[in-house]
Amino acid sequence: MAVEKSTFEAYRDRVSKPLVRIFTTFGRDHWAVFGVGLVLNLIQRGASLVPPFILGVAIDAVFNQTQAYELPLLPAAWIPGDRAGQLWLSFGLIIGSYLLLAVSSLARGLCMDYFSHRVMHDVRTTTYRKLQRLDMGFFESEDTGELMSVLNNDVSNFERFFDDAFVRATRIAAVLLGVTAILVYLNWQLALVTLSALPLLAVGTLLYHRLVEPAYDAIRSAVGSMNTRLENNLGGMQLIKSTATEEYENERVRDVSWDYFESNWWRIKLELFYHPGSRFLTNVAFGMTFLVGGVWLVSGPPGPFTGELSVGTLVTFLFMSQRIRNPMRDIASVVDLYENARASGKRVFGLLDMPVRITDAPDVEKLPAVDGHVEYDSVTFDYENAVPSPADAEPDGGTVATDTQDGWNSSDDETDPVLKDVSFEAEPGETVALVGATGAGKSTVLKLLLRLYDVDEGAIRIDGYDLRDVTLASLRESIGYVSQETYLFGGTIRENIAYGRFDATDEEIREAAKIAEAHEFIERLPEGYDTQVGERGVRVSGGQRQRISIARTVVGDPDILIFDEATSAVDTETEMLIQRSLDRLSADRTTFIIAHRLSTIRDADKILVLDDGEIVERGTHEELLERDSLYANLWRVQAGQIDELPEEFIDDAIDRTSGQ
Ligand SMILES: Nc1ncnc2c1ncn2[C@@H]1O[C@H](COP(=O)(O)OP(=O)(O)OP(=O)(O)O)[C@@H](O)[C@H]1O
């Protein structure tokens, strides 16, 4: 059975010519540096070929005196007439070319390293920026480890490609061309012997490239899966230990690691065949040059060969045939680096090509300071439609243009939406509570207010502004969101409270902490506001984390507040403190509260009872009790007013929460 591709994989597979795109998209601003680097590379390689050539001429002209001292490109007038002068000239040219080699190598390194690191930096920051703009639906459908591996491993592969492969490739080209030119110039017949390995090597390299290419896509995917597994496991270490599932996880890590080994092993075996094979061929060419040249010197031109050969020329030939050995050996690594970077490029552009649906439409305005009138107008929504589908990446699956509304699931599917025709209003300053069974859609209603997802039908308006007609940043800045799952960044308490309003003064931070009932416990910590909270806030308790995040919301001074189960994860005492701070905070702002404990919302101006994505009851606490329906039953259970629930209510509850 074919394994279904993820959306990211589908976009990855439609990327063509990724390395050309890297050049034209990210290398464009640094062309000049790259060009200078290439020229310096050619100079460096050219300089490395001069000494063996001079050596050959010196042997024939200075030591054996069988030929006149002549060098191409050097005017005859510059060549001394005596042997001592010619020896010094040879010495000067050899040292000079080594000096040029050193200087050009340094300058080339500076240019190419600068280029590759700048490109890598630009690719990484652009990819991260894009990642942050992608919709929540995307993050819910893709593995974080996979995304980490794009940002980290894949981007680093470009650096190795530009830094290493490019330099090696130009070296191969320059040395092969230079050596061929010099050898043909000196003795084209012997050159045929020395260079006879090249066509065979070219065929072998082409074959190697063909075989190794598919392996790299598999290797990059295996790295992504491995990252995902490791990240999941490190994040879930407490669960692994508490459930004693170490052995099970060992197996799972071993499996992904084995997949990586297997996909890599095929490439390694190919490489192991290729390297000694290519080395053997160039060594055979070296041996043949020695044999044919030796016979030529000892007893005249062998077989079909004609003309003269000097000792100096043979020495140059032998040196030069050694010179082509390293570039030959490098071909395989260049092919590897190229394939690796190509596979990585497909992944990076796969990500960059993913469409963003929730983004600022052209010409949208900033949401001004608002009174807080919120209106839900016949809102229908389903998560299914918020996730781009792999089929959208196919050429006939609709045009997929970056940052457009195209290329997303259509809502043609016949699934039951999560929210159905939800309509209500919150007047400025009102507190609206949402209650209902787990999975009824309460959080979804409020996630739509933050525009983490877009409504499928209907509209949500704040002070008459449709959320889609204002900038995302201004919308989210005007809303403070406190949820049960608080997240703190590694850093100090002070930094976490000021997160989002980085210019907040110490005074404002302390005031906010007081309102959030956090000041007391912070002051009691040895380092106070400078206490490090640890990664994700692990060094402070759940209740403390919650109060720090409320302080962060206070500092942000939003016009509208959302409390999503903000007090459900703490003990009664802390809950009381948090509740007090939330009351203070919500006093003059439009506030939405989701709470399972109905006692915390009995004073709300409006209570909306959700059932399976629909508002089934609405009113104040008293009005709903009077109705004597779902809410009234829930209240009676929680208030302990009845010992036993009516059968009918239990059946309904099972119905309501089933499948959630
Ligand atoms: N990111 C998501 N992707 C797909 N389905 C989701 C997603 N988040 C929630 N759902 C589904 O949408 C429905 C409503 O979920 P929601 O979180 O809004 O319910 P809730 O009333 O807030 O529940 P709870 O009281 O348990 O928090 C549920 O069936 C849930 O499984």
Image (cartoon, helix red, strand yellow):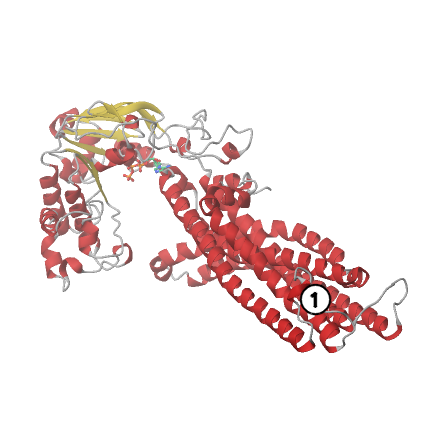
Query: Which image quarter: residue 96?
Result: bottom right
Q: Which residue is drawn at 67% across and 50% down?
A: 210
**Going by the picture, which residue comes out furthest to the right?**
303
Helix, strand or loop at label 1? It is helix
Query: Which image quarter: residue 642?
Result: top left
Callout 1 crowding tier (Cα within 10 Å): few <14, some 14–19, many ≥20: many
Specify whether residue 187 is in view. yes
Quadrant in which ligand 1 is drawn:
top left
Up-down relation of residue 210 to residue 462 (above or below): below
Specify whether residue 225 is in view. no
Label 1 residue near ligand 1, CB within 8 Å: no
Up-down relation of residue 370 to residue 639 (above or below): above
Location of residue 212 in the rendering, given as x and y in whole percent from the top left corner: 64, 53
Location of residue 383 in the rendering, given as x and y in whole percent from the top left corner: 38, 33
Give the left or right position of residue 250, taking residue 212 as reference.
left
Location of residue 504 in the rendering, given as x and y in whole percent from the top left corner: 15, 47
Q: Residue at x 17, y 54 (%)?
A: 494
Give the left or right position of residue 469, taking residue 512 as reference.
right
Count of numbered circles in the view = 1
- The quadrant of the image that shows the C terminus is top left
563 or 19: which is nearer to us? 19
293 or 134: which is nearer to us? 293
Location of residue 540 in the rendering, given as x and y in whole percent from the top left corner: 21, 58
79 or 230: which is nearer to us? 79
- The quadrant of the image that shows the N terminus is top right
Give the left or right position of residue 115, taking residue 175 as reference.
left
Q: Which residue does the numbered mark 1 point to in the structure image?
A: 320
Which three-letter amino acid code belongs to the residue tagged 1?
A: Met
Up-down relation of residue 69 to residue 488 (above or below): below
Query: Which image quarter: residue 408?
Result: top left
524 or 88: which is nearer to us? 88
